[in-house]
Image: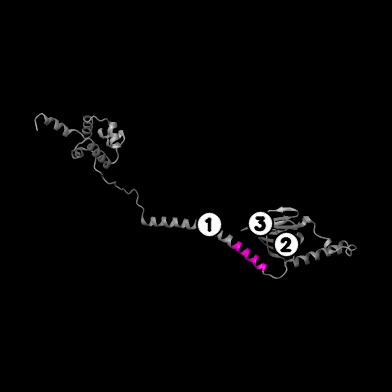
Amino acid sequence: MTANQQPDLTHEALAGCGARLRAAREAAGLSIDDVAARLHMPARVVRSLENEDWSRLGAPVFVRGQVRSYSRLLGLTTAPLMDALTVGQIEPTKLVSRTHIPQAQWWAEQIGRRLVYIVLTLSLVIPVWVATRQHLAGTAEGVAALDTPADPAAPAEREIDRTPRTVVASMAPVAASGQPAAAVSTVPGAEIVLRTSGKTWLEVVAIDGSTLAKELLPAGAERRYAASQVRRMTIGNASAVALESRGRPVDALANARANVARFEVSSDGSLVASN
């Protein structure tokens, strides 16, 4: 080694990592864009390496890898560059506990959350369970009515025959012998008419407490009852029923519970929802 080379070597040893890379690139006749294209990295990263602006390059492990790739491209020895690299060593992230929750408080919070979930679940499940029980109970009563051999229309016919005969005897005794009892009937406006569009369970109770009807009606069925003979009605599957009272339609679903509607007949012959 000559005396003329000693100052240059000393200057090179004192030079920073970025300055060495820049000097080697310029000596090789390469531009920053050329280096960026060969290393497949953005040009701003190359500038940051030469300017030793490590804060723009991310973690130290990435900086060392980029410096190593740059030095190999320029044919430099990587060990001196790694020694001259002033980027800090990689240190694991320190986890600092901000708050400390006592174990009793932690258990209380966990139990509180679970109780909230249980209450929410019960608030959804119980109404569905009650509605299902009511619907199944109504269906079971309708099926049991199908097995009854008695004619449910017989009490209604006897009750209808009884009332017209009383009216004829008191108001028109002369015409009673010439007119059949059925000729004096309730006017259409005082009738209760029920039509079904699906299977429907029906129970009709007379004024004296006897059962006028208790049956499971198919779709397309129609039933008519004199309002003066009916005390109350219970209709299952109310959504499949078209109901009329005194010639006006009645919304069976308006006060239905679990698709079961219950009505009572008022003194003027109109239907009133019953709980």
Q: Nearer the viewer, residue 162 or 115?
A: 162
Name the mark on residue 136.
none
Is disc 3 in contact with disc 1, using a CB cutoff of under 8 Å? no
Q: Nearer the viewer, residue 266 or 256?
A: 256
| Amino acid bearing label 3 | Ala
Determine the CA span between mark 3 and mark 1: 26 Å
Extent of the magenta region: 133-146
| Dot placed on the residue nearer the N-terminal end, 2 or 3 | 2
| Dot placed on the residue nearer the N-terminal end, 2 or 1 | 1
Residue 22 % position (x, y)? 23, 31
**Callout 3: 10 Å neighbours few (<14), some, many (20+)?**
some
Dominant SS of magenta comes to: helix
Residue 139 among those drawn in magenta: yes
Determine the CA span between mark 2 and mark 1: 36 Å
Quadrant the C terminus occupies: bottom right
**Callout 1: 10 Å neighbours few (<14), some, many (20+)?**
few
Residue in the image at 74% along x and 62% along y = 230
Residue 105 % position (x, y)? 39, 55
Q: Which residue is mark 2?
A: 231
Residue 218, by quadrant, is: bottom right
Q: In the drawing, does residue 225 fall left or right of residue 115?
A: right
Q: Which residue is mark 3?
A: 240
Q: Which residue is mark 1?
A: 124
Residue 274, by quadrant, is: bottom right
| Amino acid bearing label 1 | Leu
